[in-house]
Image: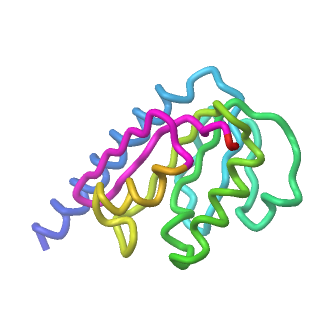
Amino acid sequence: MGRWRETLEERWNEWRLVEEAVSRTLDGLRVLRVVGPRTPRPLPLASKAIRSAELRRFSGSYEAGLACFCLGELKAEERLAFLEAWHERLGAGATVVIADRRGEGCESVFDLHQLFADTAAQLDIQVGRTFWWVRYGVKQQG
């Protein structure tokens, strides 16, 4: 029982570090937040929160985007379509932050680099024991 509690505390502490880094990255920006089924507690920086299925029907102008626990819920073949729709809503140069649990297709730095490299400028990938998070700027298409 004691080890389980220690592991839970380690995961909580790891997530707190991710939250703090995300808050620093997006501080002062107008943010479009995509929410998944397991959305973390609210962060004060989100200007607008929508479900990933609403991306193509939603309009607006945002300097940044935040998605937590969304990518891991998608099938591998749906991830690129999600990123494409999200980047369209944000536009070139917008700051993007995505965080999730480590899992299939998002387990290693290599996996994450393969997923984001084509659309990300200044890609920064952080992988912990339980969670990963990336931040980047949306590349100009064309």
Quarter of the figure with the N terminus: bottom left
Percent of width and height locating residue 59: 88, 46
Q: Is residue 137 left or right of residue 140?
A: left
Identify the colour scheme used.
Answer: rainbow
Percent of width and height locating residue 118: 52, 51
Identity of the residue drawn at 51% across and 76% down = 76
Residue 134 counted in the magenta span: yes
Which SS type dominates the magenta stretch? strand
Can you tell which quarter of the image residue 66 is in?
Answer: top right
Against 54, residue 113 (above or below) is: above
Against 5, residue 46 (above or below) is: above
Q: Is residue 10 left or right of residue 133?
A: left
Start and end of the magenta stretch?
A: 119-140
Residue 7 counted in the magenta span: no
Percent of width and height locating residue 5: 19, 64
Q: Depth check: 127 or 109 in front?
A: 109
Quarter of the figure with the C terminus: top right
Can you tell which quarter of the image residue 62 is in?
Answer: top right
Number of numbered discs visible in the structure rendering: 0
Identity of the residue drawn at 56% across and 48% down = 119
Percent of width and height locating residue 41: 54, 50
Q: Residue furthest front?
A: 142
Q: Residue furthest top?
A: 28
Identity of the residue drawn at 56% across and 77% down = 77
Can you tell which quarter of the image residue 6 is in?
Answer: bottom left
Q: Depth check: 11 or 73 in front?
A: 73
